[in-house]
Image (cartoon, coloured by chain):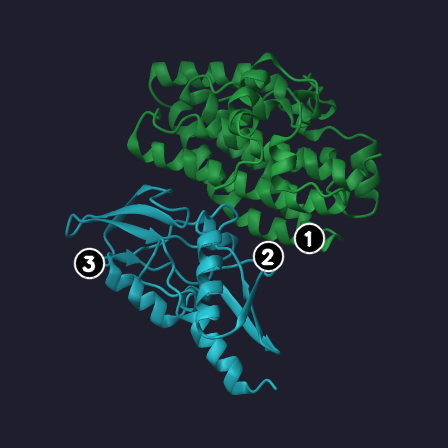
Amino acid sequence: MATPLFTALLRLADDHLILGHRLSEWCGHAPMLEEDLALPNIALDLIGQARALYTYAGEVEGAGRDEDALAYGRHERGYVNALICETENGDFARTMYRQCVFAVFMGRFWEAAVTSSDPTLAAIAAKARKETAYHIRHSAEWVIRMGDGTDESTRRMRDAATYLAPYIGELFEADTVTDALSADGIWPDPPALQSGWIADMTPILDQALLPMPDLGFAHTGGRQGVHTEGMGYLLAELHYMQRAYPGLTW
Amino acid sequence: MVTDLTEARAWSAAASVLDPEVPALTVAELGILRSVSVEGDTATARLTPTYSGCPAVLAIELAVEAALREAGFDARIERVLSPAWTTDWITEDGREKLRAYGIAPPVKASGKAALFSEPTVACPRCGSSATTRVSEFGATACQAQYRCTACAEPFDYFKCL
């Protein structure tokens, strides 16, 4: 039986691995050279944060699984990321809106996790918080620039906001796992992060001339391993090397 | 018996390793070599990553391990996460070397304000403060791209963390 801490770490690690993988798909395809560098750089940060979380999850589990075993050695139903992290990239506007939503959420999450009673989580948070500050700034600038841009960019950013709105609420979902941990001061209580998220998003969305998304309805299931269609294709690529050459290292 | 001299020798062996991505700096000047201790024949070097996802971490750890072996120690590497690395740990020498190498050193005093406000970055070539940010992200995780409007040179800025 997985402990709440292991499950929570795995969820957070999966969020970062899967979104990092999605961002890496932009490598070589971004609309300009600077973004071709920026998106894989952010992906690298996210995958680096995932590595630290997987390694710690493996230690907590105590079953001998390391970061690679956890990242590559599970089937689709074993991944417990929030659905927003696996949504297909769509166009650049959708990728940037998704990034902004997630980075602002993580900004609040890491800030709260810095004072976790779990010293390892607090250490990971102290490091990740600073990296996330750059992700917020980068994505927020694009949301503003495109939201308050040309007719074309505005249309795309509005479409992105509409498409992604029902995927945001899942980030603030609580269950017995998070309840147990937040009661002990180990894990930030997800619903408690919502007001901070709204406060941080408000000036961004105001400048981008975009409405605050309605968080009332949320697609859920990611935390139970129930995914969208795109997840299988993502994992097919992510897993390819380890499936073809099990245990491969370099 | 471990003497201060032995520990100093282990430190200078480890400290001489260059960062593979910014080869102008040693790991000591970069501030990622946190400590070196010697027990018996074993030297333990504690290193902290700059960024969580820095791809050079493993290469640096292997290079430090090799440098300690070369100096005659059994080498052990420990990766420490806390306290989190900050660009404030780059030494004064290191900052000067960065500038000479063509990379603008990070603005001092990290923290939320420094992360979010737009820093004034001086051009490492001509020294002018008339510079503009081209992109928040550059050739490595720790750099941003800037351009000097005075001498028209593009340059990398070692961004504040």
> Which one is in front, B116 or A244?
A244
Q: Residue at x 85, y 34 (%)?
A: A1
Neighbourhood count class around disc 3 (C-alpha, 10 Å): few under 14, some 14–19, many 20 upward: some
Chain B shade in the render: cyan
Q: Chain of mark 2?
A: B
Q: CA distance from mark 3 to mark 1?
A: 42 Å
User: Do marks 2 and 3 share a chain?
Assistant: yes
- Which chain corresponds to the colour green? A
**Circle 3 marks a residue in which chain?**
B
**Chain under disc 1:** A
Q: Name the mark on residue B125.
A: 3
Q: Nearer the viewer, residue A47 or A113?
A: A47
- Name the residue rendered at 49%, 38% in the picture: A136
Task: Name the residue nearer the viewer: A15 or A6.
Answer: A6
Q: Secondary structure at mark 1?
A: helix
Kindly indicate the quadrant of the structure image that contains residue A50.
top right
